[in-house]
Image (spheres, grey):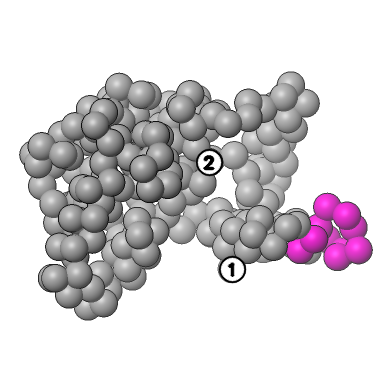
Amino acid sequence: MPLLVFALYITGSLNTVLSEEHRREICRYIYNQQNEDGGWGKQMLGPSTMFGSCLNYVTLRLLGEEKTHDALSKGREWILSHGSAAAIPQWGKIWLSMIGLYDWSGNNPIIPELWLVPHFLPRHPGRYWVFTCMVYLPMAYLFGKKFVGPITPTILALRDELYSVPYNEIDWNKARDTCAKVDLISPRTTAQNLVWTCLNKVVEPMLNFWPVNKH
């Protein structure tokens, strides 16, 4: 549900596609899924996570709910007490970046140029498991474009609500590798950290000059 609302908000069609009754029922559904600790889980009735809490909190605000609502106050308290939206896992960082609530520089590279390598190579993304492939393809494109939706007053307000420091003072280099403990399923190995360091410091700056990122 949050991802649909995000997409409709970015395209400016939220109130066109969703009637007032639909928006009210979506809010009611999200409120009913909130855990007693104030957060939301990734799945229905699941334990609170930064991913679920941030996406559901933002969704309610995009649907017109006020931040002073008791449930939103509890949700915001949960988010800030667990590291703020800076600690959302990778897929959450991508979604927040698209809507203007997280800077693209705080993401590890999702390289669209990998789609240009010969398909016979075993690491070609087209050979990934279908779910991974279909998620990676649009995320790689959006990462390459550094796409950001309209920055509305609601988005500006959310920038203040989701973080414990002013938005323009966030250390995005640190946030890039920050993940809330409740969301960290499998910590990265030393080898993986070395790969990401190489991509961030060497490869990504070079790719910024490639034609693929200019169109």
**Amino acid carrying mark 2 in the image:** Gln
Residue carrying label 2? 90
In front: label 2 or label 1: 2
Image quarter hosting the N terminus: bottom left
Taking the image as shown, residue 56 lies to the left or right of residue 183, namely: left
Compared with 158, 130 (above or below) is below
**Residue 57 in view of the camera:** yes
Quarter assignment of residue 40:
top left
Residue in view at x 73 percent, y 58 percent: 129
Image quarter hosting the C terminus: bottom right
Quarter assignment of residue 101:
top left
Give the CA separation, mark 2 to mark 1. Answer: 25 Å
**Residue 198 in view of the camera:** no
Where is residue 70 shown, x and y percent of the image?
A: 10, 37
Mark closer to the chain start, 2 or 1: 2
Name the one closer to the observer, 17 or 39: 39
Where is residue 73 shown, x and y percent of the image?
A: 15, 34
Where is residue 160 shown, x and y percent of the image?
A: 22, 36
Residue in view at x 50 percent, y 54 percent: 146
Where is residue 28 shown, x and y percent of the image?
A: 18, 55
Taking the image as shown, residue 1 lies to the left or right of residue 57, namely: right
Magenta segment: 117-127
- Identify the element where label 2 is drawn: helix
Circle 2 Cα neighbour tier, 10 Å, few/some/many (<14 / 14–19 / ≥20): some
Residue carrying label 1? 215
Residue in view at x 15 percent, y 62 percent: 24
**Amino acid carrying mark 1 in the image:** His
Circle 1 Cα neighbour tier, 10 Å, few/some/many (<14 / 14–19 / ≥20): few
Q: Is the magenta stretch mostly helix, strand or loop?
A: loop
- Identify the element where label 1 is drawn: loop
Q: Does the magenta stretch include residue 98?
A: no
